[in-house]
Image (cartoon, grey):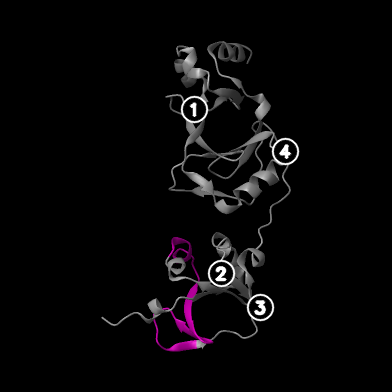
Amino acid sequence: MAADPANDIKTFLLHIDVSNKALLGTIRHWGNIKVAFDERSVWVKDLTIEQVRSIAIQSMPFKKIFYAKGQLLFAEDSLVPTGKIPSSLLWSPADRSLPIEMPKPNHNFFGINEKINIKIMPSEVVKQPFALLISETEAAKYILGAPKIRLEQLSWTVFGKKALIIGSPMLPVSGQVFWKNGDALLPAGYDFEFPILHQTIVETGNPKGENWMIWQENSDFSFVPKSAFKPLSRSSWRLTFSQI
């Protein structure tokens, strides 16, 4: 079998139509790449073979991959040049060429969700559980009979019509599990679409760090004041729900 000439080339280029530049959001944090624009296209250079073969690139529609020899462009699996790198391109780091803009947030509480352009996406990375959202009925079955020592490391508050319990070890009760990313609580199995920006996202939405940002799988979120949480105990549970 003939050797793949592209495997001997360390630098690759990606080309997409400028109307699809949002697709590059998933790779803008790669520090080695440069980006340039012309009237109709976006070019990305200095990609490594590992990056070209990554899920982020391979799952990107409407793309073209090239490798270069001098100023000549070759299709990824071809020995015949298909054109030249445009000489007029001005290259700059990806995070500078592809800024992400976030709307100014409104600080809403308890059941009032705010939608922003930042999304959370399914993730295969396992994270340590931190919070549990559970119905009053299901939680009471365990809490009202649990020993004090089993509850004293936990805090809780009412969130909508359910109980939101934080801390560890988590109660052995079925409910919606969240993990902690700064002041953000994300559903288990999800992460920010752009994980590298998680600190910016949290600081922008919660600049004083006074709230937990509770995210749902549809990328809506709510704020819950940290001051609303109290130690979990049988007495605090009975007192709270007797008043609701």
The residue that disc 4 covers is 208
Marks 2 & 1, CB-CB < 8 Å contact: no
Residue 90 is marked as: 3
Q: CA distance from mark 3 to mark 4?
A: 39 Å
Judge left or right: residue 79 versus residue 111.
Answer: left
Residue 181, image x, y percentages: 56, 41
Q: CA distance from mark 1 to mark 4?
A: 25 Å
Residue 200, image x, y percentages: 65, 49
Dot placed on the residue nearer the N-terminal end, 4 or 2: 2
Q: Is residue 35 visible?
A: yes
Dot placed on the residue nearer the N-terminal end, 2 or 3: 2
Seen in the picture, residue 58 relative to 144 is either above or below; the reply is: below
Marks 1 & 4, CB-CB < 8 Å contact: no
Dot placed on the residue nearer the N-terminal end, 3 or 4: 3
- Residue 200 is covered by the magenta coloring: no
Check disc 3 and give the amino acid type: Leu
Seen in the picture, residue 228 relative to 7 is either above or below; the reply is: above
The residue that disc 2 covers is 33
Q: Secondary structure at mark 4?
A: loop
Comparing 52 with 93, the one in front is 93
Check disc 4 and give the amino acid type: Lys
Assign the C terminus to one quadrant of the image: top right
The residue that disc 1 covers is 168
Check disc 2 and give the amino acid type: Ile
- Which residue reaches farthest left? 1
Q: CA distance from mark 2 to mark 1?
A: 41 Å
Dot placed on the residue nearer the N-terminal end, 1 or 4: 1
Marks 2 & 3, CB-CB < 8 Å contact: no
Judge left or right: residue 9 versus residue 217.
Answer: left
